[in-house]
């Protein structure tokens, strides 16, 4: 019945989309309830002005995090088949289909449904962690990547109408993932698996961006004779390192700078795709670093072209070309989604215990009072020793050059005094911190003084 219910769900989703489209068509030019535009209208009615909304948006960061569970595992083959059937149902909704086109769609739909029905839904072998990573990335590749420009287009259109001075912040929305980095929840997540997961994330981002750059290389045919370009864009076209293909385009289309710059970006992305990222992550010998290494490197040529379009009076081209590309670059960067690295707390405790002991801070980190037991308390609810240790820690977080330590450890447990004093001594010697050490305990004074 799994296949049957999958098909029923597709039919319901298709019906829901049909209803929403009919509602939007009937409501136009008014906005739909619960839409982005309706939300901004409500804010306007509540008296929110441009300045306040800009401040709120600048402080907003939404991160959607992907995770995986063995019971939710599904073959990407089945996901792709289901996706294709959904696309066929959407196409059938077109009102101007010819009879021959409708017949062909029905044949294709029957073929896809038959393949889905006769395809084994579960894997014959237990999926690897990297299989789960690829399944998560499948949704980025087939749905999310193209949905982001549409989302931002809706946001920008509504803002322009209701709050024209408000600009969307670059990091309003990003994605994260636990898949491939959650060692706490999956014992099969090793360093090699995490490295491969990062490589897969980067590989998808680079290839998606490269496809867009190649498309812009074919479509941005604006002539510099008709639309002058900025000096910054012109300078970026004449760097020393260029591929043969870019040199060919320079010779063939000397007056089409946007096409050339898009081709250069596509070449840089191809270089980034071919780079041996896995070797670097695992500490193995690798070749030279690619030109594109960060999100800023990716955004620089995109913004150069966007600024030049506006300066040359061709800003009408931007919303359907470089605008969507910019939003995809801001949301996905060169990594698609941030990978959360999660580890069993016992491993963290072991490492911290070794560090604390090695630095003479405390011999037993695990035995320290948990932070959640004291963070919600007022100072008078803490013991004298806890207050003194908190005061020392607070002073050190300010990176001071001079500290007045007035009876700094007088109420600290005897077993901890030496550890704290040893730490303060190291700070004095290694960082040059000066202490005014006040105490009634002559032994402590001798221990801490330069000369006892």
Image: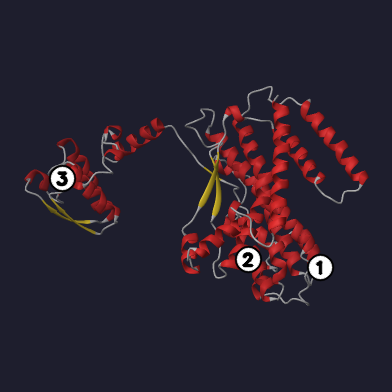
Q: Nearer the viewer, mark 3 or mark 2?
A: 2
Q: Residue at x 62, y 46 (%)?
A: 202
* Residue 147 x/y as whole percent: 66, 51
| Residue 131 position by quadrant | top right
> Residue placed farthest to the front in the image?
26
- Checking the image for residue 409, the label placed there is 3
Q: Nearer the viewer, residue 174 or 436?
A: 174
- Checking the image for residue 251, the label placed there is 1
Element at label 3 = loop
* Residue 119 x/y as whole percent: 76, 26
| Residue 132 position by quadrant | top right
Q: How is the image coloured?
A: secondary structure
| Circles 1 and 3 in contact, beta carbons < 8 Å | no
* Residue 219 x/y as whole percent: 78, 62
Q: Nearer the viewer, residue 81 or 227?
A: 81
Element at label 2 = helix
- Checking the image for residue 303, the label placed there is 2
- Checking the image for residue 238, the label placed there is none
Element at label 1 = helix
Q: Residue at x 33, y 38 (%)?
A: 355
Q: Nearer the viewer, residue 64 or 107?
A: 107
- Other residues around mark 3 within 10 Å, as few (<14) / some (14–19) / many (≥20): many
Q: Earlier in the sequence, mark 1 or mark 3?
A: 1
Q: Nearer the viewer, mark 2 or mark 1?
A: 2
| Circles 3 and 2 in contact, beta carbons < 8 Å | no
Q: Is residue 196 above or below residue 264?
A: above
């Amino acid at each position: 019945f799994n296949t049957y219910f999958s098909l029923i769900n597709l039919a319901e989703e298709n019906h829901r989309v049909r209803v929403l489209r009919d509602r939007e068509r009937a409501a136009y030019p008014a906005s739909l309830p619960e839409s982005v535009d309706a939300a901004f209208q409500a804010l306007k009615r509540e008296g929110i002005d441009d300045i306040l909304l800009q401040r709120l948006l600048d402080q907003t960061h939404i991160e959607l995090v992907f995770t995986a569970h063995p019971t939710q595992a599904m073959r990407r083959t089945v996901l792709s088949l289901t996706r294709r059937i959904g696309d066929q149902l959407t196409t059938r909704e077109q009102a101007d289909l010819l009879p021959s086109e409708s017949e062909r769609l029905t044949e294709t739909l029957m073929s896809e449904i038959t393949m889905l029905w006769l395809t084994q839904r579960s894997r014959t072998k237990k999926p690897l962690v990297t299989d789960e990573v690829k399944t998560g990335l499948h949704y980025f590749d087939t749905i999310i990547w193209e949905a982001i420009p549409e989302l931002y287009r809706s946001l920008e259109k509504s803002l322009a109408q209701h709050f024209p001075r408000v600009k969307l912040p670059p990091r309003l929305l990003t994605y994260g993932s636990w898949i491939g980095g959650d060692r706490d929840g999956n014992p099969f997540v090793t360093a090699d698996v995490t490295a491969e997961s990062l490589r897969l994330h980067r590989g998808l981002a680079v290839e998606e961006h490269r496809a867009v750059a190649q498309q812009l290389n074919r479509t941005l045919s604006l002539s510099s004779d008709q639309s002058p370009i900025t000096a910054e864009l012109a300078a970026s076209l004449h760097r020393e390192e260029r591929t043969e293909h870019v040199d060919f385009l320079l010779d063939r289309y000397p007056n089409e700078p946007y096409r050339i710059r898009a081709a250069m970006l596509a070449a840089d992305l191809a270089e980034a795709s071919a780079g041996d990222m896995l070797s670097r992550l695992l500490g193995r010998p690798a070749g030279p670093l690619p030109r594109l290494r960060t999100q800023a490197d990716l955004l620089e040529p995109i913004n150069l072209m966007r600024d030049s379009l506006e300066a040359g009076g061709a800003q009408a081209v931007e919303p359907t070309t470089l605008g969507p590309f910019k939003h995809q670059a801001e949301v996905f960067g060169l990594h698609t989604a941030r990978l959360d690295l999660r580890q069993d707390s016992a491993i963290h405790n072991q490492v911290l215990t070794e560090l604390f002991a090695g630095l003479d801070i405390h011999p037993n980190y695990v035995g320290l009072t948990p932070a959640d037991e004291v963070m919600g308390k007022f100072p008078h609810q803490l013991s004298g020793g806890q207050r003194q240790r908190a005061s020392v820690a607070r002073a050190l977080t300010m990176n001071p050059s001079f500290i007045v330590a007035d009876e700094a450890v007088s109420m600290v447990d005897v077993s901890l005094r030496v550890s704290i004093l040893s730490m303060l001594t190291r700070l004095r010697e290694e960082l040059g911190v000066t202490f005014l050490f006040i105490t009634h305990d002559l032994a402590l004074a001798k221990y801490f003084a330069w000369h006892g």
